Image: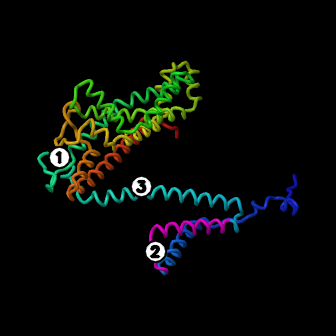
Amino acid sequence: MSATTTPGPAATRSRPAELAQGTLPPHIAPVLLAGSVVLVGALLLALGRFSLPLLAVTVLLVYTTTITVASARVEGGRKAKDRFVTAVVYTCFGLAMVPLVSVLWTVVTNGVQRMSLDFLTVSMNGVTPTMDAGGVYHAIVGTLMVTGMAAVISVPIGLLTAIYLVEYGGNSRLAKAIVFFVDVMTGIPSIVAGLFVVALWMTLFGPGQGSGAAGAVALSVLMIPVVVRSCEEMLRLVPHELREAAYALGVPKWLTILKVVLPTAASGITTGIMLALARVIGETAPLILTAGSSAVRINWNLFDGQMMTLPVFIYSQVRMGDAINYERAWAAALTLILVVMLLFLAARLVGRLFAPKQAR
């Protein structure tokens, strides 16, 4: 039989002091946060200086100080630093959410007043600016068709370019040149893209020939670099071992890319494409120059006549300045947000559908 030895006093004393510290209760963080809100709110009300921004800033300072001091006394310095950094991270996240929530709240509260099924299913054909009628159906159709054509142009070009940069280009001069020009194109102002397409369209078809197709080309100029960069990063995240395993089985490189690399990165690629769409779906300046800003009828032909889009509709309504026009503008802004949300939902479903199945 082997004797069991227990650590003596000397061994116990030799353990680091940090390991012998206690632990705060698991629900201490929300309790301290709620207590900080109550205490600071009551104090500000008593002083007559209550305001939401001041309350938020003071509560964050009080909570961060309290949780750090309590953790230092009970858990030790290392855990206190961890809790301090955690509080700072959550604070930064909250600050980042403030403008997003503010924008969404403002658009929803102002846009829901005029939002209705009739607003979404009729156009502005025959409606004067001051009439209490009309809707955005023609702008919804134009937005979906223009951005859809822009995606059809941009996604294949951007994805194939990213595949070349990751799988074939390496450190070649051509790959470096492509990366340089993609980075330059990422920072091009949207109005410059619109002017470029206007000059190109006038050269090919003559002056005054704006159309939805011209707007789609302008949006694709802005969309391609975003697709290239996002797809490139997603393809680089695919483990190289997966490629080597396919090559070891005798699979050609093009088939490895098609059957292994792309399905593995499908979710990230879809997200990158949706970010590129979100980047261009709200553009106004290039569409005013290319697709026009005076269309009031539903136009299903991208190559024939002007085509209204939601961003341009919002701009044109705000320019008129009447109360009814502002109501239409807010409702159109809410419609644009809903369209983007639906597109992101569809992209998530597509990415999940084509993602590789995981073993259970």
Residue type marked 2: Phe
Q: Nearer the viewer, residue 270 or 63?
A: 63
Up the image or down, 77 lies above or below 252; here it is below
For marks 3 and 2 on the same chain, the one whose residue lies earlier in the sequence? 2
Circle 2 residues within 10 Å: few <14, some 14–19, many ≥20: some
Up the image or down, 231 lies above or below 1; here it is above
Q: Residue furthest bottom?
A: 46
Is label 3 in a helix, a strand or a loop? helix
Residue type marked 3: Leu
For marks 1 and 3 on the same chain, the one whose residue lies earlier in the sequence? 3
Residue that numbered label 3 is attached to:
100
- Segment tinted magenta in the rendering: 47-71
Residue that numbered label 1 is attached to:
123
> Residue 11: x, y in percent?
86, 59
Question: Seen in the image, is 314 located left or right of residue 6?
Answer: left
Q: Tell me which secondary structure the magenta stretch mostly adopts.
A: helix
> Residue 119: x, y in percent?
20, 52
Residue that numbered label 2 is attached to:
50
> Residue 251: x, y in percent?
52, 20
Question: Seen in the image, is 8 located left or right of residue 132?
Answer: right
Q: Is residue 112 magenta?
A: no
Quote the CA–CA distance across marks 1 and 2.
Answer: 47 Å
